[in-house]
Amino acid sequence: MKKETIYVTGGAGFVGSNLCEKLLLLKYKVVALDNFKTGRKFFLKKCLQNSNFQIKKLDLKNKKKLISAIKPNSVIFHLSANADLQFGIDNRLIDIKENIQVTHNILEACIKKKIKKIIFSSTGSVYGEANLYPTPENYKYPIQTSLYANSKNCCEGMITTYSKYFNLNYTIFRFVSVLGQKYTHGHVKDFCKKLIKNKKEIKIFGNGKQKKSYIHVDDCVNALILSIKNKKFDKEIFNLGTEDWITVNQSLNLICKILKLKPKVIREEKKRSGWPGDNPKILLSTNKIKKLGWKTKKNIKESIKDTVEYLISNPFLLK
Ligand SMILES: NC(=O)c1ccc[n+]([C@@H]2O[C@H](COP(=O)([O-])OP(=O)(O)OC[C@H]3O[C@@H](n4cnc5c(N)ncnc54)[C@H](O)[C@@H]3O)[C@@H](O)[C@H]2O)c1
């Protein structure tokens, strides 16, 4: 593909801002669309120094404004979402509005503006409590366990349907939890926040035996970018993750080691998951994408270390 304008929805967020930076390095013209609900201008500091970058403050639920913000024949990385699975239990409309409604608006914009390709950030949580690990892309879904994953599932379905109706090109990525610079939500932040407040004791959700895979944001972004360079990614779904997984207890030990702390750990011994919708095991098979030349550069331990160091050097993110 030649260097057309690339739109990044959720471009001020954790993954989005890392993606914008990398696209600019590759000399693309980048327009980030974001309402700054969880995104931060701070994450776009480097991007804003580049004349190929533009940020448009916009709520993507406003279909009219969204459509007029996008130039024809461009490419859209659709990353905006309510990205926090835990919100859905109390606010049971958030995933419907921020994920399903917004994705529907984006798809309408794709048709009206003859968008060349949409790249969508789905989640490994769509597999619910799978019985097969590592879980491959063609695994039949068991019962869904969160409205968040449900909404991503619905978005995937809308994308493939629009593709059938209108021949829209797409790539869907199902990520495990992402770590690295500009990280804003997830267990590493929660643990660091608690440990800074109370160095002597930490309470964790669940029995700590939950076992999960994580991916570094640089590896995640590299995969996203491959999808606009290699036609073999067209109209395909890929898992994204590392080959290893780590328990919550092991992750906490590592974080304490980096922070040089030895707190007393209080666990919910009888609970195998941390909260409703928290799948106690996540490990995705990445054989499909590895066959196309992608591989991870950082393992989970290195990713946790990078994340803790980033949070400590930007302490306002822990407030
Ligand atoms: N971070 C992870 O561990 C992870 C794992 C799996 C999937 N994902 C998916 O990857 C994507 C990016 O996640 P993230 O961690 O960067 O989340 P994030 O919350 O940091 O980024 C989301 C961005 O979207 C923006 N946004 C939300 N609603 C909007 C709206 N209505 N209009 C305009 N902007 C809006 C937010 O302000 C934010 O900048 C999400 O779709 C998420 O579901 C993330």
Image (cartoon, rainbow, N blue to C red):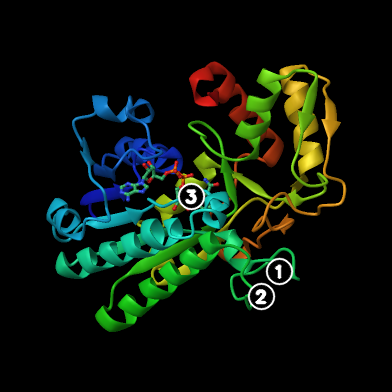
**Residue tagged 1:** 130
Residue 208: assigned label: none
| Residue 112 seen in this snapshot | yes
- Pointers 1 and 2 in contact (CB under 8 A)? yes
Q: Is mark 3 within 8 Å of ligand 1?
A: yes
User: Are there few (<14), some (14-19), or many (20+) residues within 10 Å of tag 1?
Assistant: many
How far across and down, in percent of the image, does residue 124 sit? 59, 60
Earlier sequence position, callout 1 versus callout 3? 3
**Residue tagged 3:** 83
Where disc 2 sits, the SS reads: loop
Residue beneath the point at 19% across and 55% down = 66
- Pointers 3 and 2 in contact (CB under 8 A)? no
Q: Amino acid at mark 3?
A: Ala
How far across and down, in percent of the image, does residue 271 sit? 81, 52
Where disc 3 sits, the SS reads: loop
Q: Amino acid at mark 1?
A: Ala
**Badge nearest the viewer, 1 or 3:** 3
Question: Considering the image in quadrants, where does the N terminus appear?
Answer: bottom left
Q: Is mark 1 within 8 Å of ligand 1?
A: no
Q: Amino acid at mark 2?
A: Pro
**Residue tagged 2:** 142
How far across and down, in percent of the image, does residue 17 sit? 38, 37
Q: In the current view of this chain or complex, which residue is farthest to the bottom?
A: 165
Earlier sequence position, callout 3 versus callout 2? 3
